[in-house]
Image (spheres, grey):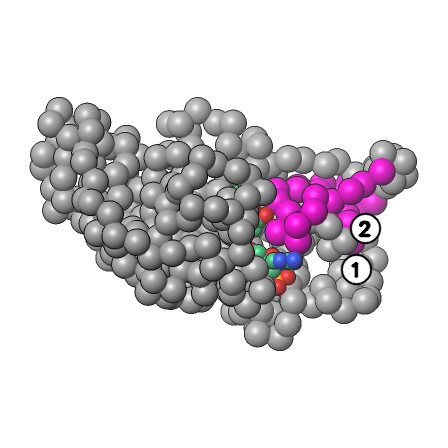
Amino acid sequence: MRIIQIHQFGSPEVLKVEEKEEPQVGPNQVVIDVQVAGVCFGDTIIRSGKYPLPLPLVPGLEVAGRVSGVGSDGDQSLVGKLVVARTKNNTGGYAEQAVVDATDIFHIPTGLSIEQAVGVFLSGQTAVGLIKAVNITPGEVVLITAAAGSLGSQLVQQARAAGAGTVIGAAHGKKKLDLITQLGADVAIDYSEDDWVEQVRKATDGKGADLVLDGVGGSIGHQAFEATAKGSGRLGVYGFSSGAWTQIETRELAARGITVIAPLTIAFAKPPHEARVDAEIALAEAEAGRLTAVIGQTYPLERAAEAHAAIEARQTTGKVLLIP
Ligand SMILES: NC(=O)c1ccc[n+]([C@@H]2O[C@H](COP(=O)([O-])OP(=O)(O)OC[C@H]3O[C@@H](n4cnc5c(N)ncnc54)[C@H](OP(=O)(O)O)[C@@H]3O)[C@@H](O)[C@H]2O)c1
């Protein structure tokens, strides 16, 4: 079978197509003939070596396809079923076949395409976990950065569904702002404009956002902190796609009276059965038509390096998929 493997950390070019023997299924595992593999921002971090895993490695933490093999002690009726799954140790997804733990598979609901299933799977589960962790009060103003991204595009929809009164999406460039508006945001702001924090204040009668969800970090993350409502606002920090975590001085926090939350850690600290419920919610919401994955880009497996380069160049919207 064909796989994408890396033997050294580095730029996208380290992602090489290779041939490998078909995987052996172990006890309590299943083999999936991969039809669609998700590409996550985190895959680019692992590939670059900023979060080193043992080499060589096949990236990819989410796959969907038909079960083609079940371990000897497993449920053989799973063979042929369409499933979406998280890979073991968050690796092995960029391949024609993937072995996953049987406990990590989810049946793809009837009526949901395999692309949508991957699109709302881990990003949707993460968004469900983040939204639960920040407890939106009905009517609140919620500001979401990188709102046209994989997670951001789900957060825009889920914040609205959780009762946000006003959803403000911030991103870079007209194409992304148009998408944010299509997803249901009330206000779309370009945070490459110098006065974007002022634009948030104007859109909120000078108050700022009640809740900010930021996965960009760096200077945009700090500006998002400045756009958070003084005295009562909450800043939920869940990532650093800019390459740097948001730096906030304690004196700045004290002066603004803002609560900082780490919703991703809250979401990821859940026991597995609760995390599973979050994924099931995302899949069910998608099946019901209330949650949509924006499938921004689809690449054949052998062009995985282009997919990574596009993510790092901020050229992608929504979910990026690989087709083996
Ligand atoms: N997807 C998940 O399930 C998941 C799970 C856990 C954690 N996270 C974290 O959440 C954050 C977002 O992940 P994602 O998968 O949803 O990614 P994404 O939003 O699809 O992509 C990241 C976005 O960040 C913005 N950005 C700003 N500065 C950037 C820079 N210097 N380089 C690259 N991007 C930059 C870009 O949007 P603009 O061009 O609009 O600025 C870019 O599209 C990441 O920190 C990730 O590690 C994601």
SS at mark 1 in the image: helix
Q: Which mark is residue 197?
A: 1
Q: Quadrant of the C terminus?
A: bottom left
> In this picture, which residue range is highlighted in magenta?
222-249
User: In the picture provided, is 250 more to the left or to the right than 86?
Assistant: right
- Check whether the beta carbons of the residues at disc 1 and disc 2 lie within 8 A of each other: yes
- Mark 2 — residue? 226
Seen as rendered, the residue at the extreme front is 7
Image coordinates of residue 58 in percent, x first then y, are: 37, 45
Nearer to the camera, 27 or 134: 27
Element type at marker 2? Answer: helix
Which of the 4 image quadrants contains residue 27? top left
Q: Is residue 111 above or below residue 28?
A: below
20 left or right, relative to 76: right
Report the label total: 2
The kind of residue tagged 1 is: Val
Residue shown at 14% from the left, 44% from the top: 68
